[in-house]
Image: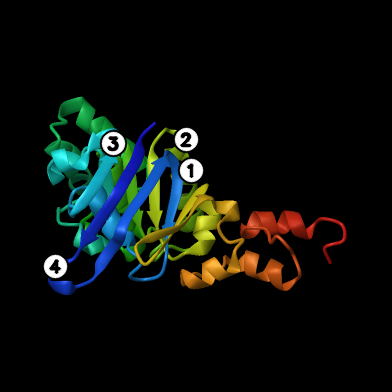
Amino acid sequence: MPDIDLRDVRFAYPEGAGVYAEPGLSLQLRGGSIALVGENGAGKTTLTKLLNGLLRPQTGAVQVAGVMVRERSVAQMARLVGYVFQNPDDQLFERTVRAEVAFGPKMMGRTGAELTALVDAALTRCQLSSHASTHPHDLGLADRKWVTIASALAADAPVVVLDEPTLGQDRHARDRLARLVTSLAEDGRLVLVVTHDMDFVAQACHTTVILTRGAVAYVGPTDRAFDDEDRVRRAGLELPHATRLARALGARPAPLGDRAFLDWWRLPGTK
């Protein structure tokens, strides 16, 4: 099972631009669908860039899928960490969707039938096969986001980082994305979802990590992540909408997410 292991990690931005993880961050994650949440400036992006070597810690050790990040280049870490940027336009540069999705595995030496199979599988999984010959920038924002997701999947990395994956997605696409995250976790990958969308966290992620000012305020089951109202407030988070409604109706503890709310609502004595 792929894993993420940070041990006493400290990272300081240059010239006093801010300090992340003081005095040191330790975090161990073992597979599955994991949400990484916290207010802007909490350290979410810094943490994910430490995973693929884009940033290097001043102290401590970062290990991903059994590999020490400090011993590998960013290009080598791309074999282990598939990274989907928040803004797809920061990532897209090829002339067709197929070429875009094929770029990563080609750079890793995949060729011939193996390359074709990886690309076809990613296009199918992201429902992009009909757009294979389309220029990525001729697609809408939501579909451009799916192109970057397909690119990460085609690289076949054991760890996938999705930065704000629900950006521009309607309800149907969000549901499809939740199913994809679940299926990737069932395939044995570790999927790290960086998001401000607590409804999606409730829907798709079994584990949640809450960061507050570069420190881990909570790590554990998602269905317990929002129990402590003070912790949620300090982290600058909002409760999932269904959970907020259930609390207003007197539920203690409040159910997490739409499905759990409906199950609670149907119970005798809740109304």
Provide the secondary structure element on which disc 3 rests. Answer: loop
Q: Which residue is mark 3?
A: 156
Does residue 110 appear left or right of residue 42 in this picture? left
Please give the residue where the numbered disc 1 appears in the rendered image.
182
Q: Position of residue 228 (x, y in %)?
A: 59, 64
User: Considering only order in the chain, which callout, 3 or 1, is on the residue closer to the N terminus?
Assistant: 3
Q: Secondary structure at mark 4?
A: helix
Image point (64%, 69%), residue name: 244
Cα distance in 3D space between marks 3 and 2: 14 Å
Q: Is residue 33 visible?
A: yes
For marks 1 and 4, the one nearer the N-term is 4
Q: Quickly name the residue at label 2.
A: 186
User: Split into 4 quadrants, where in the image is the N terminus?
Assistant: top left
Badge 3 amino acid: Asp
Q: Label 2 is placed on what type of residue?
A: Glu
Q: Secondary structure at mark 2?
A: helix
Rounded to the nearest angstrom, the CA distance separating label 1 from label 4 is 38 Å
> Along the line of sight, which residue is nearer the eye, 65 or 103?
65
